[in-house]
Amino acid sequence: MNAITMKNVQKVIGGTSIISDVSLTIPKGSIYGFLGPNGAGKTTTIRLILGLIRPTSGSIEVAGQRLTINRRAALAQIGSLVEGPSLYPHLSGADNVRIAALIHTISAKRVSEVLEIVGLSSAADKLVGQYSLGMKQRLGIAIALLHKPSLLILDEPTNGLDPSGIKDLRQLIVSFQRDHGMTVFISSHLLNEIEQVATHIGVIHHGHLLFEGAKEALRSYSHPSFLLTTPTTDKALAIIKDMNIATEAKNSQVIIHASTNEEIAQITKQLVSSGVAIHELRQIDNDLESIFMRLTNTEEAKV
């Protein structure tokens, strides 16, 4: 049984299709990284899964429960943190969790358990107004874990965090899967962070799903990239783009996402004939960011 199954989901708002024919399969026990730039449709997809908005068409199942039929049973499986936690800054961390436990009629014993899980036991009596942003995020996750969900959904959880806070949250996410057998669905535009924790990847752009599968499958799906070093980066970029080949500037160099060696030969010939000096041209291994850029550039070319 999958943690989440979406089939041919579309969401139209004001005559505009925000999500178009999206089908997702999130395996139970996975860390699923949902990647896309801001405005790609990540948060809309999450709101659909959480039942906050209804799909225009298509179906959504959570742990085998159809959301439109068994809504309460489906949502009982989910803990979520979307767009930051709502907390009382004048109360302690423990009191914030206790209030949430009372609202949901959850045993007081669970309060100390979730604070321990997210590493906030030592700061439980500290006022939330004195918490760092990373601590507030972890407290919001603790509240989401109160009812022992099998699935945790996190929407851009590392936004605004410093490197230390990002590292702590990354380790926490891995521990949910490793130590508690949870499925974690995490949306982000921070590709490097997703690459370090995810077992499965979905890439969305302009409301269209461009890729879904195991992280290793995404790498094998990609084509080689090439690094070009030239003193005239802007001119080289313009020439290659005119050839309808995906490219990007990175650290005063040019990354070329060519499909074949023949394309590289054509690019080299065109650059030289246009007076572009080539100081270096070599194949590089594709990291997740390069693959993502290739996918989204290909999608842009279709628009």
Image: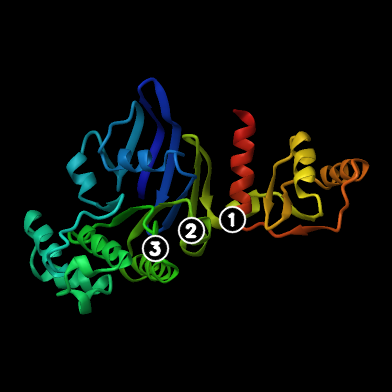
| Marked residue nearer the N-terminal end (2 or 1) | 2
Mark 3 vs mark 2, CA separation in Å: 15 Å
SS under mark 3: loop
* Numbered disc in front, either 3 or 2: 3
Quadrant housing residue 50: top left
User: Could you tell me which residue is drawn at 88 percent across and 52 percent down?
Assistant: 277
Between 207 and 253, the one nearer to me in the picture = 253
Say how the picture is coloured: rainbow
SS under mark 2: helix
User: Could you tell me which residue is drawn at 74 percent across and 35 percent down?
Assistant: 244
Identity of the amino acid at label 3? Leu
Q: How crowded is mark 2: few (under 14 residues within 10 Å), some or many (20 or more)?
A: many
Residue 85 in picture, x, y percent from top left: 25, 55
* Numbered disc in front, either 1 or 3: 3
> Which disc is residue 194 wearing?
2
As displayed, is residue 118 above or below residue 10? below
> Which disc is residue 288 wearing?
1
Identity of the amino acid at label 2? Ile
What residue is disc 3 on? 161
Identity of the amino acid at label 1? Leu
